[in-house]
Every structure is written in structure tokens, then in C-alpha cells.
Image (tube, coloured by chain):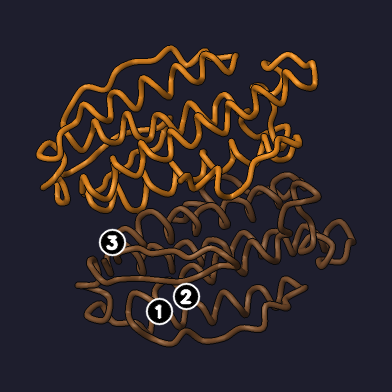
Chain colours: A brown, B orange
């Protein structure tokens, strides 16, 4: 469970940080306030870049905390600048790295229950990781990438996958 | 290895099929040739919807064939319509479902080598699945979703995650 999650999540969060740096540089080069890009979205009824990054972080922070039986750190969810998003990613990576393999390994069969608005979700640990955390995490990292790419930021697949 | 791959990949390919059906219905309702949507992209130098679906399928087809030591079926990569993309997804699901757990389980340490253009890649099986197939697969499924969403197709997170 640990091997299938934290090393790859922290790698991808570092890649996301790198992609956002390129977004920030792009805004500077265009002489545009970075917060315009941070608030941009692919459709009017879709979440903006800031929220994509927040939720990507939360999949790791809240998801891994649930599997490890820990209380996740609370963030204010009010980032409007690239610098604030970088800080959130750094705090998420630090939390993920504080989790030890033995706190997560063996959670395959752990019962996981949570609610989002009026929906209640029930999983066992392995199913929670494979069918919830992982697809949601990659969805939001990729959508953050796509928002920047759609605006003309020069990023490619190797920025997404990392070295 | 099997549990972490094929059941979730086939589920997500079914979700992708469902999302593309909504895209096809959207084009019909707008009285637009579906192939316009199939050829659309989020940036001029990004791959179109057809290619996003092709590559998502290929991550499963070629990736799982490599892990299982099988010869993957060859597709012509020439889809230009929703119907052709649906056929590709169906063939990919059928191939994935033909792979038995015992053909994939135990491939964690298998040496995987392949080349894309001038780049050579080397992995062991578990690393190949976690750091290559999975992030690439979700990237292309999400980007297909984002191209349709950006065009106004009424799809949401539950269409992506499936029931």
C-alpha cells in the first residue's frame, strides 16, 4: 500500500510544483498577474486552477491520513497566488513524507467511510486507494496541467511525468 | 499486480466510453459532425481527442501485454469518428479481460525495456505499472474528458469515476 502510493504521489506533487513554476514564469513573461492564471478554468462551470491543485493535494493529505489512521493537517483552501499554491504543495509533501510505511501497509482491508455533501462513501483500503484516491489525484493534476497548457504555457508530457 | 491494474483500467475504459457517448450526443444535438469534436484539442500543439483515446487504450493494451509477456493486438491508429473510438475501447477491454491474473501476478520484478523515438526506457514491473502506465493512462483519459468538457459537453466527475 505504501509503495503504491506515497513515493509516486510525492514525485507527482513535485512535478506539479515544477509545472506551476512554469505557469508563474509564463504569466511574468506576458506581464499578466499570476492570479489570473490561478483563477482560470477550462469551462465556466468547472473548477479553477487553484481548486485543482487544492484537491490534488487533498487526495494525498486526506486519503493517506485515512489509510494511516491519522488526523490530516487542516488547510484554509484560500490560495489565490502561485506562491500560496507552492506552499500548499510543500506542506502536503512534508505531511506525506512524515507517514511511515508501517502506518499504511496492512490497510488493504481497513474500512473507510466518509461523506461529501449528501453522498456517503464506503470502501475497503485497497479499493479506496485504487478506485478513489489514485483516479482523483491524477484527474486534478492533469486538469491543472491542461489549464496551463490551454493558456499557452510551454509544458510537455515529460514535465508531467517527471525525470 | 493484477488487482492494481486490470479491474480498474477496464472500469475506467467503460467510463471513457460513456463520456464519449455523451460527446457524440452533444455533437448531434448541436447538428455538428462528430468528427470535428474527435479532432479537437486544448492547444494547437497538443494531441486531439482521437489520439488521447488511442493512447489511453494503448497504455492498457501494450502495458499489460508487456507485463504478461504477451503480444498485444495491433490497431491501425486511424480513428476519426466516435463509432471507431468506441470500437477501439471495446477491443481494448476484450484484450484486457482475456489476461488472467496469474499472467500478471509476479511481474513486480520483471525487467521491462522499450523505446519511444530516440528514448530508451527501463523499468521493473511494479515501477512500470505505478510510475508509467497508471499516470499515463489517467492523463489521457482526463485530457479526453477535458477536451469534451471544454466544448460544453455536460459531463461531471461522476461520469469520470463511474458508478
Give the vertical position of A34 relative to A90 (above or below): above
Relative image position of residue B81 (x, y in whole percent): 59, 14
Share a chain, discs 1 and 2?
Answer: yes
Give the vertical position of B142 relative to A107 (above or below): above
Q: CA distance from mark 2 to mark 3?
A: 15 Å
Relative image position of residue A56 (x, y in whole percent): 55, 64
Is the C-beta separation of discs 1 and 2 under 8 Å? Answer: yes
Q: Chain of mark 3?
A: A
Q: 10 Å neighbourhood of mark 3: few (<14), some, or many (≥20)?
A: many
Residue B14 or residue A9, whichever sits in front = B14
Is the C-beta separation of discs 3 and 1 under 8 Å? Answer: no
Total marks shown come to 3
Residue located 49% across and 20% down the image: B86
Label 3, on which residue? A126
**SS for dot 2:** helix
Q: CA distance from mark 3 to mark 1?
A: 14 Å
Q: Quadrant of residue B72?
A: top left
Residue located 74% across and 47% down the image: A42
Q: Earlier in the sequence, mark 3 or mark 1?
A: 1
**Left or right of A36: which side holds B47?**
left
Q: CA distance from mark 1 to mark 2?
A: 5 Å
Q: Chain of mark 2?
A: A
Residue A69 or residue A87, whichever sits in front = A69
**SS for dot 3:** helix
Q: Chain of mark 1?
A: A
**Left or right of A37: which side holds B70?**
left
Label 1, on which residue? A65
Q: Residue A62 got which mark? A: 2
Share a chain, discs 2 and 3?
Answer: yes
Amino acid at each position: 500500500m505504501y509503495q503504491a502510493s506515497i513515493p509516486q504521489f510525492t514525485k507527482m506533487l513535485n512535478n506539479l510544483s515544477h509545472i506551476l513554476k512554469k505557469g508563474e514564469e509564463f504569466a511574468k513573461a506576458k506581464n499578466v498577474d499570476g492570479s489570473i492564471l490561478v483563477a482560470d478554468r477550462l469551462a465556466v462551470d468547472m473548477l479553477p486552477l487553484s481548486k485543482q491543485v487544492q484537491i490534488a493535494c487533498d487526495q494525498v493529505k486526506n486519503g493517506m491520513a485515512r489509510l494511516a489512521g491519522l488526523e490530516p493537517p487542516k488547510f484554509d483552501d484560500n490560495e489565490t497566488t502561485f506562491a500560496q499554491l507552492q506552499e500548499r504543495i510543500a506542506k502536503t509533501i512534508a505531511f506525506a513524507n512524515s507517514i511511515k510505511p508501517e502506518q499504511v501497509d496492512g490497510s488493504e482491508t481497513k474500512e473507510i467511510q466518509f461523506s461529501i455533501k449528501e453522498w456517503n462513501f464506503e470502501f475497503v483500503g485497497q479499493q479506496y486507494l485504487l478506485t478513489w484516491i489514485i483516479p482523483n489525484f491524477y484527474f486534478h493534476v492533469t486538469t491543472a496541467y491542461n489549464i496551463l497548457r490551454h493558456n499557452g504555457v510551454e509544458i510537455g508530457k515529460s514535465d508531467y511525468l517527471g525525470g
